[in-house]
Amino acid sequence: MVDTEIIAMSNILRATILTVTYIVSVIITIFLIGFVLWLIAPKCGMSCLGWTPIAPMFLETIVFTIIIVVPILITFLINRQLDTKVVVKAKS
């Protein structure tokens, strides 16, 4: 009975941790992409990014893909770590 309560409580805690992790990861990823573009653009202009009428859509696609994929990967890795810790706590 006690083990079940510990696991149920850890599920609520896990959901909270993963939600916060995902939101923070998205914010950090957006800032990092903005910072990298801010570093690149002033030095050689937008021409070094291949800035043509078609390129912004391509660049947008890459940026949005990174914003979606990176936080999901980070959250997935943290979820695996939390799984490992919960299993260890439940067995002991």
Image: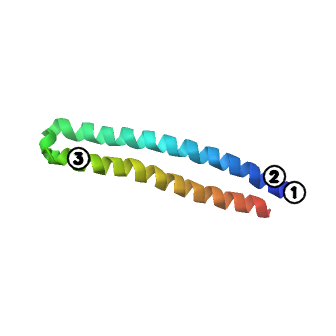
Q: Secondary structure at mark 2?
A: helix
Q: Is residue 77 above or below residue 49?
A: below
- Position of residue 1 in the picture relative to residue 12 (left or right): right
Alpha carbon distance from label 1 to label 3: 55 Å
Residue at the spot 70% in from the left edge and 58% down from the top edge: 86
- List x then y, in percent, for residue 4: 81, 56
Q: Which mark is residue 80?
A: none
Mark toward the start of the polypeptide (1 vs 3): 1
Query: Decide: marks 2, 1 in contact (CB < 8 A)?
Result: yes
Which of the image's four quarters has the N terminus?
Answer: bottom right
Compared across the picture, whether 12 is left or right of 17 comes to right
Foreground: disc 1 or disc 3: 3
Relative to 65, is 83 on the left or the right?
Answer: right
Q: Secondary structure at mark 1?
A: loop
Residue identified by numbered label 1? 1
Identity, as a three-letter code, of the amino acid under mark 2: Glu
* 14 lies left or right of 55: right
**Residue 31 percent across, percent down from the top left:** 37, 38
Q: How many residues crowd mark 2 within 10 Å: few (<14), some (14–19), many (20+)? A: few
Kindly identify which residue carries mark 3. 57
Q: Which label is found at residue 5?
A: 2
Residue ID at (80%, 62%): 92
Q: Residue furthest right?
A: 1
Residue 63 picture location, percent across and down: 31, 47
Residue type (three-letter) at the residue carrying disc 3: Met
Measured Cα–Cα span from mark 2 to mark 3: 50 Å
For mark 3, does the 10 Å Cα neighbourhood hold few (<14), some (14 to 19), or many (20 or more) residues? few
Q: Secondary structure at mark 3?
A: helix
Q: Amino acid at mark 1?
A: Met
Mark nearer the N terminus (2 vs 3): 2
